[in-house]
């Protein structure tokens, strides 16, 4: 394929991605009754208060994704050093592609196409390290929250509860030990004859030392803290009778359940809402407010960044160029 044909095809693919993304977003927003419920809840609240609270939640959204960009930049330091702005571009572009791909797989493509062609598969492996770190924290905090949930709301025998706690501790330790020894995965793959020929792609796993993995999980923890705060702020604001500890417990459980369910970002709002109602019904009967909070955070954390990311889609580098090669 000639350079001119590659350029035309690249422009066509980028335009198709942007049009497809906007079409998906438009139809989902128009059909979203939960967002209408959210606007209904705000009718009797002073406008200044609305602007302040929503403004804080939106600001936290940017903090969240800037932290993710910082993590991505750090992950790439072993492979292809990139600037922080370049990391931001790739993260937001990835969010655009993630909205219409199962389990956010498009997010990988949105990022690695900002890298030179020879380093893209290795970039996917490096991104997986960051994703595993985020998953580890989700599972650890979710398991701890699950123990408190069982203790408070599920009547079980004392001995059985102790068994649940031990299981949760084992669950947490497994994930933490695996993460901080992720190079073991490199050794396992090398021991398999079929995967050994691809070692140039996954050998990056052996380069991450515990100190670096600790730095990565600090980024993950900061992100976890930020998006937990978004839920905390909205639930305190719209359902004032809730106890702080209950919100934290249910939010951690919500993240745990969401991480275990396969989903599509655009339809994930329905899964989030149903899960949130099932959990929060133990501490409040204001189901509409729970659904509205969940839907608004979905809009702020997923849809707004995806719209912003459409600008960066046009900077994707599908075929590479002389400089990147």
Image (cartoon, rainbow, N blue to C red):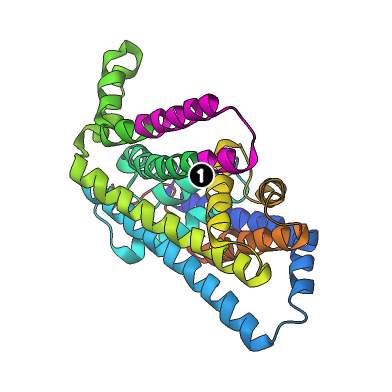
Query: Measured from the top left, where is residue 115 in percent x and y?
Result: 34, 50
Instruction: Please tell me in which quadrant of the rendered image residue 239 appears.
Output: bottom right
Viewer-proximal residue among 28 and 249: 249
Q: Secondary structure at mark 1?
A: helix
Residue 14 in sight from this viewpoint: no
Label the magenta part by its dominant secondary structure.
Answer: helix
Q: Is residue 94 above or below residue 102?
A: below
**Mark 1 neighbour density, 10 Å: few (under 14) some (14–19) many (20 or more):** many
Query: Measured from the top left, where is residue 173 in percent x and y?
Result: 35, 32
Is 158 part of what is drawn in magenta?
A: yes
The residue at 32%/48% (across/down) is 217
Q: Is residue 171 left or right of residue 215?
A: right
Viewer-proximal residue among 136 and 121: 136
The residue at 76%/72% (across/down) is 41
Is 132 part of what is drawn in magenta?
A: no
Q: Is residue 158 above or below residue 222?
A: above
Query: Measured from the top left, where is residue 22 in percent x and y?
Result: 67, 60
Query: Measured from the top left, where is residue 24 in percent x and y?
Result: 70, 55
Query: Disc 1 marks which residue?
Result: 145
Q: Which residues are drawn in magenta?
A: 146-174
Farthest residue to the front: give it.
158
Viewer-proximal residue among 114 and 243: 243
Instruction: Please tell me in which quadrant of the rendered image residue 213 appears.
Output: top left
Instruction: Please tell me in which quadrant of the rendered image residue 310 appears.
Output: bottom right
């Amino acid at each position: 394929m000639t350079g001119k044909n590659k350029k035309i095809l690249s422009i066509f693919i980028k335009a198709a991605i942007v049009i497809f993304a906007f079409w998906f977003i438009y139809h989902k927003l128009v059909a979203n009754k939960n967002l209408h419920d959210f606007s209904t809840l705000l009718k009797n609240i002073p406008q200044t208060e609305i602007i302040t609270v929503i403004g804080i939640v939106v600001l936290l959204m940017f903090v969240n994704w800037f932290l993710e960009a910082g993590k991505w930049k750090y992950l790439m330091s072993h492979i292809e050093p990139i600037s922080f702005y370049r990391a931001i571009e790739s993260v937001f572009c990835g969010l655009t592609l993630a909205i219409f791909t199962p389990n956010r797989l498009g997010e990988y493509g949105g990022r690695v196409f900002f890298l030179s062609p020879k380093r893209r598969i290795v970039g996917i492996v490096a991104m997986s390290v960051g994703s595993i770190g985020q998953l580890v924290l989700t599972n650890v905090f979710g398991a701890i929250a699950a123990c408190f949930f069982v203790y408070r709301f599920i009547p079980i025998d004392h001995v059985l509860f102790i068994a649940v706690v031990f299981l949760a501790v084992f669950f947490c330790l497994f994930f933490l030990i695996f993460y901080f020894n992720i190079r073991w995965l490199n050794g396992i793959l090398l021991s398999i004859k079929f995967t050994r020929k691809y070692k140039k792609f996954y050998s990056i796993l052996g380069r991450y030392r515990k100190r670096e993995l600790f730095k990565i999980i600090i980024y993950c923890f900061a992100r976890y803290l930020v998006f937990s705060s978004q839920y905390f702020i909205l639930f305190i604001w719209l359902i004032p009778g809730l106890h702080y500890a209950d919100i934290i417990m249910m939010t951690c459980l919500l993240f745990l359940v969401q991480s275990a369910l396969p989903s599509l970002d655009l339809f994930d709002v329905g899964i989030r809402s149903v899960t949130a109602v099932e959990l929060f019904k133990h501490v409040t009967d204001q189901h509409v407010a729970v659904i509205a909070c969940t839907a608004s955070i979905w809009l702020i954390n997923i849809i707004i960044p995806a719209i912003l990311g459409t600008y960066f889609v046009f900077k994707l580098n599908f075929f590479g160029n002389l400089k990147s090669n």
